[in-house]
Image (spheres, helix red, strand yellow):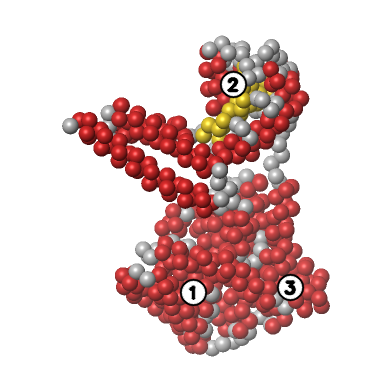
Amino acid sequence: VLLLFIIGLELSPKRLWVMRKAVFGVGMAQVLLTGLVIGGVALFAFGQSLNTAIILGLGLALSSTAFGLQSLAERKQLNSPHGRMAFAILLFQDIAAIPLIAMVPFLAGADHAMNTGESVNHGLRVLGSIAIVVIGGRYLLRPVFRIVAKTRIQEVSTATALLVVIGTAWLMELVGVSMALGAFLAGLLLADSEYRHELEAQIEPFKGLLLGLFFISVGMGANLGLLLSSPLTVLGLTLLLIGIKLPMLFLIGRTAGSLNNRSALQLGLVLAAGGEFAFVVFKIGSAQGLFEAGLYDMLVLTITLSMAITPLLFIALARWIKPRVKPVEVPEEYRDIQTDKPRVVIAGMGRMGQIVARILRAQKIPFIALDTAVESIEFSRSFGNVPVFYGDPLRPEILRAAKVDEAEYFVIATDDPDTNIKTAELIRKLYPHMKIIARARNRQHVHRLMDLGAHAVRETFYSSLEMSRQTLMGLGLSEAQANARISRFKRHDEQVLAAQHAVYDDDAKVLQTAREARADLAQLFESDRLDEEAAKS
């Protein structure tokens, strides 16, 4: 119930409006087409009644929002093309679950000759309760949360949110609708309020716990005895479900979603399993007599197994569809390293390496550069006779061919921190007396390079200092004052960096050093300001 409240909280109307084409276009197509195919199979292949087939088709067309988003987040694919499309489809499915849940009693009533008055009465109760929740949420919840916000006590705010969830869920339960739907509606109502972010921040610590409890409850709710008594039937139905949904999602992703083959296949893998709302729909259907108990247990177990199998398929197929790296054709002249006696060896001819090479070339200082990107080599050589060659600086034979032993400096300008560390380690091992200047990503990287006796140059440090200098001058300081402040900061930061090197593996001590350094720097700047004012007077 609480998990569905969180899902509802993420469905902001603004987000729906921005994604309306994907949500109400692709999402609707997925639910209707997949539901039609699954419903047709249930009707004609398994002999189910029309009403039962409709609920089966639409219920099994839904996918797990909790499972899908978690899977995408773990693989850092939420912002990928298939991740955004999956999110849009899941949004529509969550919205479509509301009328689907409300529709089950009507179809169940038709199957069991429930009198029209009773069926209409139940429908009116459901619609009335939803209307009460929507209107009450619009005109009551915001004033309540406004009062709660004035208390500035987080516990009161969290307790109020829980009260709203439980109250809404209880109201829906009273009229014969799932508590999960009530919680989902409560989240939906608060999704567009000004208190949404505060609620998300307070509930965030419980998100992982709720997700874990959800999957535990799914496993506990499955009748594993069926797997032992009818293994072929259960596994066959599970594979049939995935076998229908995955191709349908692939086709919808390719046609309506304009995804390429790889992204469309990944979309299908993420959403091929059954969803949590299907449990709610089928439970209501079972309670209303639409399904037999045996069929309900089989459906729950099928959805549960589909959730368990899909990650395994995702891992297997993700490896299979991994983009194949095309072998790079390296011209022979790039491999044939020719040099006399370089004074400097540069590893990496990206942005930093090219600037170093230009300055050395302008000074007529002999150097040689190594890179593993053919494009960088071609670009550098296009400016004339630049001695840049294809070679991995982590291979000792390449270093020997480049005559590193005759050089005075080894400049590591590659942009990958791990590669820089490995290169520095190898150079220090093979050429202990070599002077190493290495590009560093951050302070931690600087410390690791310093351990190897390399002089580390932070890649954004000096450009940040120049931006700060220009800003200070724009704010009214003279050029001399700005230069003095920047020089002061640079010297102080280098001193702090040297002091932190002794304790960089102790986070607490590094943090303490940083706090002390900030206070010292503020005092130094204040002292400089007072000296300047005294000099003026």
Q: Position of residue 148 (x, y in %)?
A: 34, 73
- 192 lies left or right of 238: left
Query: Would you name the residue on which mark 1 appears?
Result: 183
Camera-side mark, 2 or 1: 2
Q: Is residue 529 above or below residue 149?
A: above
Residue drawn at 30 percent across, 40 percent down: 526
Camera-side mark, 3 or 2: 2
Q: Which residue is outermost to the left?
A: 537
Label 3 with label 2: CB-CB less than 8 Å: no
Sequence-wise first label, 2 or 1: 1
Q: CA distance from mark 2 to mark 1?
A: 59 Å
Can residue 126 be spotted in the picture? no
Q: Is residue 405 above or below residue 209?
A: above
Q: Position of residue 186 (x, y in %)?
A: 45, 72
Sequence-wise first label, 3 or 2: 3
Query: Would you name the residue on which mark 2 appears?
Result: 379
Query: Would you name the residue on which mark 3 appears?
Result: 46
Q: Give the SS element for disc 3.
A: loop
> Counting other residues with Cα less than 10 Å from the Cα at mark 2, is it few (<14), some (14-19), or many (20 or more)?
few
